[in-house]
Amino acid sequence: NIAMDGLQAMRRGGFVEGLRRFGGLLIFGAIGTVVGTHLLVALPSRVVTLILGCFVVVFVLLNATRFTPKVPPGWERWIAGPVGFVAGILGGITNVPGTPLVLYFYALGLAKQEFVRAVAITFLIYKLVQLGAVLAYGLLTWSVTGVSVGLSAVALGGFALGLRVQDRLDQQTFDRAILTFLALLGLWLVWRSAS
Protein backbone atom coordinates (compact mmCIF):
# COMPACT_ATOMS: atom_id res chain seq x y z
CA ASN A 1 0.00 0.00 0.00
CA ILE A 2 2.75 2.44 0.89
CA ALA A 3 4.55 1.89 -2.43
CA MET A 4 1.38 2.11 -4.55
CA ASP A 5 -0.03 5.12 -2.71
CA GLY A 6 3.32 6.88 -2.90
CA LEU A 7 3.45 6.38 -6.68
CA GLN A 8 -0.19 7.44 -7.09
CA ALA A 9 0.27 10.53 -4.89
CA MET A 10 3.24 11.73 -6.94
CA ARG A 11 1.61 11.03 -10.30
CA ARG A 12 0.70 14.16 -12.26
CA GLY A 13 1.91 16.53 -9.54
CA GLY A 14 -0.18 18.28 -6.92
CA PHE A 15 1.33 16.41 -3.95
CA VAL A 16 2.29 19.54 -1.99
CA GLU A 17 -1.06 21.19 -2.72
CA GLY A 18 -2.80 18.06 -1.49
CA LEU A 19 -0.78 18.11 1.73
CA ARG A 20 -1.80 21.74 2.27
CA ARG A 21 -5.47 21.25 1.50
CA PHE A 22 -5.86 18.07 3.55
CA GLY A 23 -3.41 18.93 6.34
CA GLY A 24 -6.03 18.81 9.12
CA LEU A 25 -7.41 15.54 7.79
CA LEU A 26 -3.89 14.08 7.78
CA ILE A 27 -2.93 15.25 11.27
CA PHE A 28 -6.14 14.07 12.93
CA GLY A 29 -6.04 10.88 10.89
CA ALA A 30 -2.52 10.14 12.10
CA ILE A 31 -3.63 10.60 15.71
CA GLY A 32 -6.68 8.40 15.09
CA THR A 33 -4.47 5.73 13.51
CA VAL A 34 -2.35 5.48 16.64
CA VAL A 35 -5.48 5.34 18.83
CA GLY A 36 -7.05 2.73 16.52
CA THR A 37 -3.93 0.57 16.56
CA HIS A 38 -4.00 0.65 20.36
CA LEU A 39 -7.67 -0.43 20.25
CA LEU A 40 -6.72 -3.21 17.81
CA VAL A 41 -4.41 -4.59 20.46
CA ALA A 42 -7.01 -4.17 23.23
CA LEU A 43 -10.36 -5.01 21.54
CA PRO A 44 -11.82 -7.41 18.97
CA SER A 45 -12.65 -5.61 15.73
CA ARG A 46 -15.84 -7.52 14.82
CA VAL A 47 -18.27 -4.84 16.04
CA VAL A 48 -16.28 -2.03 14.43
CA THR A 49 -16.23 -3.93 11.13
CA LEU A 50 -20.01 -4.39 11.29
CA ILE A 51 -20.57 -0.69 11.98
CA LEU A 52 -18.24 0.27 9.15
CA GLY A 53 -19.99 -2.09 6.73
CA CYS A 54 -23.45 -0.81 7.70
CA PHE A 55 -22.25 2.78 7.32
CA VAL A 56 -21.07 2.10 3.77
CA VAL A 57 -24.23 0.22 2.77
CA VAL A 58 -26.43 3.05 4.10
CA PHE A 59 -24.34 5.60 2.19
CA VAL A 60 -24.68 3.66 -1.07
CA LEU A 61 -28.43 3.14 -0.56
CA LEU A 62 -28.93 6.86 0.07
CA ASN A 63 -26.96 7.61 -3.06
CA ALA A 64 -29.06 5.13 -5.06
CA THR A 65 -32.16 7.09 -3.99
CA ARG A 66 -30.51 10.21 -5.44
CA PHE A 67 -29.65 11.57 -1.99
CA THR A 68 -26.06 12.61 -2.46
CA PRO A 69 -24.35 13.99 0.61
CA LYS A 70 -22.29 17.02 -0.28
CA VAL A 71 -19.89 18.95 1.88
CA PRO A 72 -20.32 22.69 1.28
CA PRO A 73 -16.95 24.34 0.55
CA GLY A 74 -17.05 26.39 3.77
CA TRP A 75 -17.48 23.28 5.91
CA GLU A 76 -14.50 21.35 4.60
CA ARG A 77 -11.99 22.85 7.00
CA TRP A 78 -14.26 22.27 10.02
CA ILE A 79 -15.16 18.65 9.40
CA ALA A 80 -11.79 17.49 8.07
CA GLY A 81 -10.42 16.90 11.59
CA PRO A 82 -13.31 14.74 12.86
CA VAL A 83 -13.45 12.79 9.57
CA GLY A 84 -9.69 12.21 9.71
CA PHE A 85 -9.82 11.10 13.34
CA VAL A 86 -12.65 8.61 12.69
CA ALA A 87 -10.92 7.32 9.53
CA GLY A 88 -7.69 6.91 11.47
CA ILE A 89 -9.34 4.99 14.30
CA LEU A 90 -11.16 2.70 11.86
CA GLY A 91 -7.96 2.23 9.88
CA GLY A 92 -5.99 1.40 13.00
CA ILE A 93 -8.56 -1.18 14.12
CA THR A 94 -9.65 -2.70 10.79
CA ASN A 95 -6.82 -1.68 8.41
CA VAL A 96 -9.55 0.00 6.29
CA PRO A 97 -9.25 3.80 6.67
CA GLY A 98 -10.39 4.22 3.11
CA THR A 99 -14.13 3.87 3.52
CA PRO A 100 -14.78 7.09 5.47
CA LEU A 101 -12.11 8.86 3.43
CA VAL A 102 -13.62 7.81 0.09
CA LEU A 103 -17.07 8.84 1.32
CA TYR A 104 -15.69 12.20 2.45
CA PHE A 105 -13.83 12.89 -0.81
CA TYR A 106 -16.89 11.84 -2.79
CA ALA A 107 -19.03 14.23 -0.73
CA LEU A 108 -16.54 17.01 -1.50
CA GLY A 109 -17.29 16.47 -5.19
CA LEU A 110 -13.65 16.17 -6.19
CA ALA A 111 -12.84 15.67 -9.86
CA LYS A 112 -11.34 12.30 -10.81
CA GLN A 113 -7.66 13.29 -10.62
CA GLU A 114 -8.12 15.29 -7.40
CA PHE A 115 -10.07 12.40 -5.89
CA VAL A 116 -7.38 9.84 -6.72
CA ARG A 117 -4.60 12.13 -5.47
CA ALA A 118 -6.47 12.89 -2.22
CA VAL A 119 -7.02 9.18 -1.53
CA ALA A 120 -3.39 8.37 -2.32
CA ILE A 121 -1.95 11.13 -0.13
CA THR A 122 -4.11 10.29 2.87
CA PHE A 123 -3.52 6.55 2.51
CA LEU A 124 0.22 7.12 2.21
CA ILE A 125 0.41 9.19 5.40
CA TYR A 126 -2.00 6.98 7.37
CA LYS A 127 -0.20 3.79 6.33
CA LEU A 128 3.22 5.20 7.27
CA VAL A 129 1.86 6.15 10.70
CA GLN A 130 0.18 2.74 11.00
CA LEU A 131 3.44 0.99 10.11
CA GLY A 132 5.16 2.85 12.94
CA ALA A 133 2.36 2.01 15.38
CA VAL A 134 2.29 -1.66 14.36
CA LEU A 135 6.05 -1.88 14.83
CA ALA A 136 5.77 -0.18 18.22
CA TYR A 137 3.16 -2.71 19.39
CA GLY A 138 5.19 -5.64 18.06
CA LEU A 139 2.48 -6.77 15.63
CA LEU A 140 4.78 -7.02 12.59
CA THR A 141 7.05 -10.06 12.56
CA TRP A 142 9.91 -10.80 10.15
CA SER A 143 7.93 -13.61 8.49
CA VAL A 144 4.95 -11.31 7.89
CA THR A 145 7.32 -8.68 6.50
CA GLY A 146 8.78 -11.20 4.05
CA VAL A 147 5.35 -12.24 2.81
CA SER A 148 4.34 -8.57 2.50
CA VAL A 149 7.35 -7.76 0.34
CA GLY A 150 6.57 -10.70 -1.97
CA LEU A 151 2.91 -9.76 -2.28
CA SER A 152 3.88 -6.14 -2.95
CA ALA A 153 5.45 -7.19 -6.25
CA VAL A 154 2.17 -8.82 -7.32
CA ALA A 155 0.17 -5.81 -6.13
CA LEU A 156 2.34 -3.40 -8.12
CA GLY A 157 1.53 -5.36 -11.30
CA GLY A 158 -2.19 -5.01 -10.61
CA PHE A 159 -1.64 -1.35 -9.76
CA ALA A 160 -0.10 -0.70 -13.20
CA LEU A 161 -3.19 -2.22 -14.84
CA GLY A 162 -5.46 -0.15 -12.58
CA LEU A 163 -3.72 3.06 -13.64
CA ARG A 164 -4.49 2.30 -17.28
CA VAL A 165 -8.16 1.69 -16.48
CA GLN A 166 -8.34 4.87 -14.36
CA ASP A 167 -6.95 6.99 -17.19
CA ARG A 168 -9.62 5.73 -19.61
CA LEU A 169 -12.65 6.32 -17.38
CA ASP A 170 -14.71 9.48 -17.79
CA GLN A 171 -15.98 11.27 -14.65
CA GLN A 172 -19.48 9.72 -14.66
CA THR A 173 -18.17 6.17 -15.08
CA PHE A 174 -15.55 6.86 -12.40
CA ASP A 175 -18.27 8.01 -9.95
CA ARG A 176 -20.33 4.88 -10.68
CA ALA A 177 -17.27 2.69 -10.16
CA ILE A 178 -16.68 4.30 -6.75
CA LEU A 179 -20.27 3.67 -5.66
CA THR A 180 -20.16 0.07 -6.91
CA PHE A 181 -16.90 -0.50 -5.06
CA LEU A 182 -18.33 1.01 -1.88
CA ALA A 183 -21.47 -1.13 -2.11
CA LEU A 184 -19.44 -4.33 -2.51
CA LEU A 185 -17.06 -3.32 0.26
CA GLY A 186 -19.92 -2.51 2.64
CA LEU A 187 -21.69 -5.81 1.98
CA TRP A 188 -18.43 -7.72 2.38
CA LEU A 189 -17.70 -5.98 5.71
CA VAL A 190 -21.20 -6.79 7.03
CA TRP A 191 -20.86 -10.43 5.90
CA ARG A 192 -17.36 -10.70 7.40
CA SER A 193 -18.46 -9.36 10.77
CA ALA A 194 -21.50 -11.70 10.84
CA SER A 195 -19.60 -14.87 9.96
Image (tube, rainbow, N blue to C red):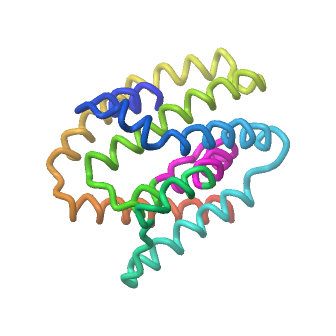
In the image, residue 176 above or below residue 137: below
Point 29% across, 62% down: residue: 175
* Residue 172 visible (yes or no): yes
Q: In which quarter of the image is residue 109?
A: bottom left
Q: Where is residue 84 in the image (x, y as percent from the top left)?
A: 58, 48
In the image, residue 64 above or below residue 6: below
From the image, give the main secondary structure of the stretch colored magenta. helix
Confirm whether the magenta stretch covers residue 68: no
Point 53% across, 74% down: residue: 58
In the image, residue 58 above or below residue 102: below
**Residue interval drawn in magenta:** 83-101
Point 47% across, 43% down: residue: 22
- Looking at this view, is 159 or 14 the one in front? 14
Quadrant housing the C terminus? bottom right
In the image, residue 114 above or below residue 107: above
* Residue 195 visible (yes or no): no
- Looking at this view, is 55 or 27 the one in front? 27
Q: Where is residue 8 in the image (x, y as percent from the top left)?
A: 33, 33
Confirm whether the magenta stretch covers residue 93: yes
Q: Position of residue 116 (x, y in %)?
A: 33, 45
